Image (cartoon, rainbow, N blue to C red):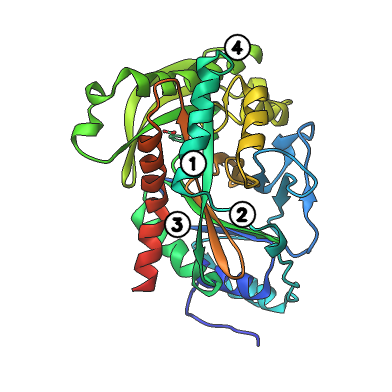
Amino acid sequence: MQITSTEKISVSKGISVCLEKNLIFAAYRLPNQQDPEIVIQKSPKKNRIHKDDNYYNLKGFLVAPFAETEKYPSFIISPDIYASKHLSDEQYNELQSLKVLPVLSDESHLPVAVGHDDYLGQIENIIGQIEQGNFEKVVLSRVKVLPGNYISRLAHIFDELTCAYPNAFIFIFNAGPHLWIGATPEPLLKAQNGTMHTVSLAGTRAFSEQNLNIGAWNSKERLEQEYVTRYISKVLSKFNLADVELVGPYTKQAGNLVHLRTDFSFRSEELKNCLGKFLKELQPTPAVCGMPRIQSLELIAKLEKHERAYYAGFIGPLGLNNRLSIFVNIRCMKVLQKRLALFVGGGITADSDPEDEWKETELKAETLISVLRKVEE
Ligand SMILES: C=C(O[C@H]1C=CC=C(C(=O)O)[C@@H]1O)C(=O)O
């Protein structure tokens, strides 16, 4: 049915239609911005990308996994239809005319939920390895599974996330069996007016006025974040980036939580021809992986019972509105036909208390669960 109307078609309506048709698309709302944006690809084929590609010439919504595999590749969603705030009648008609794509079920690889005792056992294992001098920090994650089919409610959940978390990056993306939604507080790389920005984010407390005061944070928490800062500084010097400026650490609210954060900025020119390589070198940082990195990747693969897939990978718009804004995919969930899989993790260091670490992941899960409760009311 063709429409010509004076009624505006919202991004939220666009999300619903894309989900009904199972199209490859992404919608997002950048931190501290009003309007959500939507990127819809007409072709059903994933556009895979590689780190040697010239990212500067890419346009669309970038999706990269925690660890690149055949099953979880990096790809970019083409902006065949791109709209901010509203779709035009023409765009909506074009969307309506696109064919429904088959649902590619991923139910054969269900993320395995890990309970309290198993999680504490894994943390103790990591602390033991840190005490033996094999690691400085390892970020362990787990999955919380919530039964139910939420697909028809995702547009509503997206809208609620945008209201609940104005300073987060709110996103949803769908491509084949990969359907994810979340509200991440962690920018990975942003380019603005010739300057690039990245952050070191780690250390978590429940939000309170008192916890916004940096003086309230202890040396364990500061060290946990300091590892990330050191790692990023090292990557920046490896790429010979000039004029690096560093601000922090300071406290930053993320919904029901507060984190420690340090901001880095540097000239973007230098990365023009090696952005893909730089991103792969930078991510995963010890905010989601560990120190040393390769050994942490191996330990994570050995200990965790689930595949991280796109959790702790990176996502965001590239080359749209002349912007580059990429975020680390945390505070997120994978949406399956009959369940949601919430991914939550936390940094383990020598002084970690396993029970506190469990509580921290419960708090992190609340970021999304509190919004799910709202849409169920
Ligand atoms: C790995 C996650 O958070 C990271 C970002 C901020 C604080 C973190 C922490 O305190 O452990 C984590 O490094 C997650 O939310 O799943």
Q: Nearer the viewer, residue 42 or 228?
A: 228
Quarter of the image for residue 361 reads top left
Instruction: Work out how far the residue at label 1 is from the one at label 4, CA to CA, in angstroms.
Output: 36 Å
| Residue 45 makes an appearance in the image | yes
Instruction: Work out how far the residue at label 3 is from the one at label 4, CA to CA, in angstroms.
Output: 36 Å
**Camera-nearest label, 2 or 4:** 2
**Camera-nearest label, 3 or 2:** 2
Amino acid at the residue labelled 3: Asp
**Camera-nearest label, 3 or 4:** 4
Instruction: Work out how far the residue at label 2 is from the one at label 1, CA to CA, in angstroms.
Output: 15 Å
Q: Secondary structure at mark 2?
A: loop
**Camera-nearest label, 2 or 1:** 1
Spot occupied by residue 84 in the image (x, y as percentages of width and height): 53, 59
Instruction: Work out how far the residue at label 3 is from the one at label 1, CA to CA, in angstroms.
Output: 39 Å
**Residue under the image location 67 percent in, 43 percent down:** 64
The residue that mark 4 highlights is 237
Quadrant placement of the C terminus = bottom left
The residue that mark 1 highlights is 119
Q: Which numbered disc, 1 or 4, marks the residue that appears first in the sequence?
A: 1
Q: Which numbered disc, 2 or 4, marks the residue that appears first in the sequence?
A: 2
Q: Which numbered disc, 3 or 2, marks the residue that appears first in the sequence?
A: 3
Q: Secondary structure at mark 4?
A: helix
The residue that mark 3 highlights is 35
Q: Secondary structure at mark 3?
A: loop
Spot occupied by residue 201 in the image (x, y as percentages of width and height): 44, 30
Q: Secondary structure at mark 1?
A: helix
Instruction: Work out how far the residue at label 3 is from the one at label 2, CA to CA, in angstroms.
Output: 33 Å
The residue that mark 2 highlights is 111
**Is residue 319 toward the left or the right of residue 250 in the image?**
right
Amino acid at the residue labelled 2: Pro
